[in-house]
Amino acid sequence: MDRYIYSCVPNTMMFQIKHEEDNSKKYVLIAAFLGVITLIEVALFYSTSFNLPVILIPLSFIKFLVVVGFFMNLQFEKKLLKLFFLLGFVLSIPFILILFLERSVI
Amino acid sequence: MSSVDTIQEHEATGVSNQKMAMWLFLSSEVVFFAVLISTYLFYKGKFSQGNLSPEELFDIPFTSVSSFILLMSSLTMVLSHNFYEIKNYEKSRIWIFATAFLGILFISGQIYEYTEFIQSGLTISSSIFGTAFYFVTGFHGLHVVIGVILLLTTGSQIGPNKNNRKYGLSIESLALYWHCVDIVWIVIFTVVYLIP
């Protein structure tokens, strides 16, 4: 386990803070993209000719990934932190399965 | 290019303990909300015969504006963190307060929405759907309120003529928390409000 954890981190034992350049414009563009997706979602809601879950779930997932990847900076984070976040989804699967298995029994 | 400062904090994994703890906390939040949203889906159709259905009750244009406000608060939060990183503490403080303001606006919208629903007959005890709905959106709202308190507290501690360097990890952790609250709402908005 220890060997695995250390394989996820750089050789240095020092915690470092990187002073990044001004990324304001990049973040504004990303937010505009998220806003456009939200507008598309609402427009689709009022359109009856689409199968809503099939379109809205992937759009919502894209927004989720963009916020996690760019705003939370997870794409640039260490593997260990990505695994921690993923752990939440893995741990929630048994709870959700129990809930829906219960439903099928009822 | 970017310069690198080394802080005298030795961390066994190369990630600060505070940041790691925050990601573990967010992981537990994912489990919490995944189960709450699943419970909502489980009980979605179980509303009382006399009550309005969710489709008749929800005001989608209003909730869309609320969602947009929360989405934009993620932008103001990331801008605050960005300006903190480039040591522009005054702008960082302004954007933190802007985030808190958008958070308050979102909560005000939620209170207005709840008032409308209660007047229409949907209370936490009127049906099992009502219980599930208020639990999901209420717990999310509680997270927003906690976030706003933390934002106001942190915002008041940084600025010119203050020891700003020590708040770096706090702002990063706060930003992570706020973005997590935002992604939870992205899922709630789609699953609870938009999908029939």
Image (cartoon, rainbow, N blue to C red):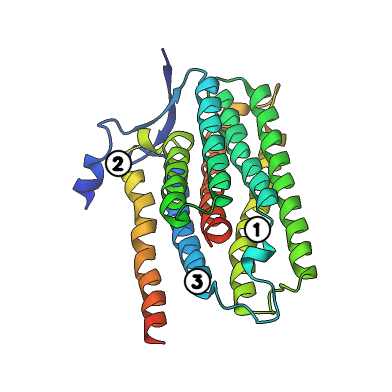
Q: Is residue B175 above or below residue A101?
A: above
User: Do the numbered discs 1 and 3 sit on residues whose CB atoms are within 8 Å?
Assistant: no
Q: Nearer the viewer, mark 1 or mark 3?
A: 3
Residue sitting at 51 percent across and 42 percent down?
B176
Residue A79: assigned label: 2
Quadrant of the image occupied by residue B69: top right
Quarter of the image for the C terminus of chain A: give it.
bottom left
Looking at the rendered structure, the secondary structure element under dot 2 is: helix
10 Å neighbourhood of mark 1: few (<14), some, or many (≥20)? few
Mark 1 or mark 3: name the one nearer the start of the chain. 3
Residue B48: image location, x then y, percent: 65, 81
Residue B90: image location, x then y, percent: 68, 23
User: Do the numbered discs 2 and 3 sit on residues whose CB atoms are within 8 Å?
Assistant: no
Residue type highlighted by circle 2: Lys
Residue type highlighted by circle 3: Thr
Quadrant of the image occupied by residue B27: bottom left
Nearest the eye: A33 or B79: A33
- Using residue A83 as the reference point, say whether residue B24 is left or right of it: right
Residue sitting at 72 percent across and 35 percent down?
B156
Residue A15: image location, x then y, percent: 39, 32
Looking at the rendered structure, the secondary structure element under dot 3 is: helix
Task: Say which residue label 1 marks.
Answer: B142
Cα distance in 3D space between marks 2 and 3: 31 Å
Q: Nearer the viewer, mark 1 or mark 2?
A: 1
Residue sitting at 36 percent across and 79 percent down?
A101
Residue sitting at 39 percent across and 71 percent down?
A95
Looking at the rendered structure, the secondary structure element under dot 1 is: helix
Task: Say which residue label 3 marks.
Answer: B39
Residue B115: image location, x then y, percent: 78, 63
